[in-house]
Image (tube, rainbow, N blue to C red):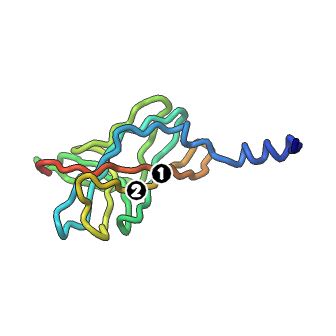
Amino acid sequence: MYRIPLAVLLSITLASPVLADALKVEAPWMRATAPGQKVAAGFMTLTADSAMTLVGGSSPTCGDVELHYMKMENGVMEMREMQEIPLPAGQAVHLEPGGLHVMCIGLKKPVVAGQKVPLTLHLRGSDGKTRKRAVDLQARKTSGH
């Protein structure tokens, strides 16, 4: 039987961020794109056990991932970039069409219905440290914009 010093076990445990249990991701999906389209929006519901902030993302599918929101201005719906999305403890934050969403910019190829699109969420905890959480967005065909 092997004996591992308690200090070693504690250092391994404390060094490993337990983000998988701290953030619940529900119904992640992305709109399928038309040929030549260079952007795609991603949606999901995020619920954090403790307060944290979504500060960005990355994906091998596109050149850049931005956080966006939709806003009605002078009778016209406009999309705006935002630097972060607060995730209050225990409250579901909905990223949905017509509201908050992640935007993949500079798609390397079309997103096809049925495809899983890998996305890494970048999150800042209350301790100021940035952590990452991998998510697969299920691409689906939708009507309208």
* Left or right position of 32 against 101: left
The x, y position of residue 70, in whole percent, is: 24, 48
Q: Residue furthest front?
A: 1
Q: Which residue is mark 2?
A: 118
- 125 is higher (above) or lower (below) than 92: below
Name the amino acid, label 2: Pro
Question: Do the numbered discs 1 and 2 sit on residues whose CB atoms are within 8 Å?
Answer: yes
Q: Quadrant of residue 28?
A: top left
Residue ID at (34%, 39%): 27
Q: CA distance from mark 1 to mark 2?
A: 7 Å
The x, y position of residue 63, in whole percent, is: 37, 69
The image's mark for residue 20 is none
Towards the viewer: 118 or 121: 118
Residue ID at (20%, 66%): 37
The x, y position of residue 93, in whole percent, is: 38, 36
Q: Which residue is mark 1?
A: 134
Q: Earlier in the sequence, mark 1 or mark 2?
A: 2
Number of residues whose C-alpha sits closer than 10 Å to that of mark 1, classed few (under 14), some (14–19) or many (20 or more) = some
Q: Quadrant of residue 10?
A: top right
